[in-house]
Image (cartoon, grey):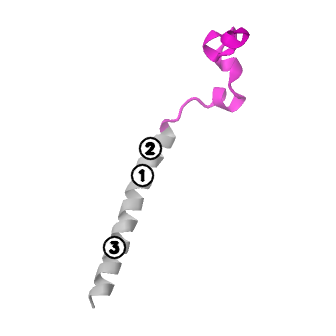
Amino acid sequence: MENQFNTPEHSNEKQEEKLPPIAVEEKDDAPAGRNIKRTIIIAVCVLIVFYLIYYFMSAH
């Protein structure tokens, strides 16, 4: 029962005090989100090219 208040919700520390310094300094992840969309588009294009190569090579 003593450890009931050791959870982060009941702690006296602020959230920023518990986080590592890099997480406090770099809060904005928006650029990473833009790169994910671009990466998915490139991956789909590469898969389409591989499929077309396989399809036309196996047909002949």
Could you say whether the residue bearing mark 2 is in a helix, strand or loop? helix
Q: Which residues are magenta?
A: 1-30
Relative side of 40 to 27, left or right: left
Residue tagged 2:
34
Residue 15 among magenta residues: yes
Q: Secondary structure at mark 1?
A: helix
Residue at left offset 41%, top offset 48%: 37
Dominant secondary structure of the residues highlighted in magenta in the image: helix
- Identify the disc placed on residue 38: 1
Q: Quadrant of the N terminus?
A: top right
Sequence-first tag of 3 and 1: 1
Vertical comparison of 1 with 32: above or below: above
- The type of residue carrying mark 2 is Arg
**CB of mark 1 within 8 Å of CB of mark 2?**
yes
Residue 48: horizontal and vertical position, in percent? 33, 68
Taking 33 as reference, is 4 above or below it? above
Q: Residue at x 33, y 73 (%)?
A: 51
Residue designated by label 3:
51
Please identify, in this view, whether the residue under mark 3 or under mark 1 is nearer the observer.
3
| Quadrant hosting residue 26 | top right
Residue 14 position within the rendered picture, expressed as x and y whole percent measured from the top left: 66, 13
Q: CA distance from mark 2 to mark 3?
A: 26 Å
Local crowd size for mark 3, using a 10 Å CA cut-off: few (<14), some (14–19), many (≥20): few
Residue shown at 27% from the left, 91% from the top: 60
| Residue 43 vs residue 34, the one in the foreground | 43
Mark closer to the chain start, 2 or 3: 2
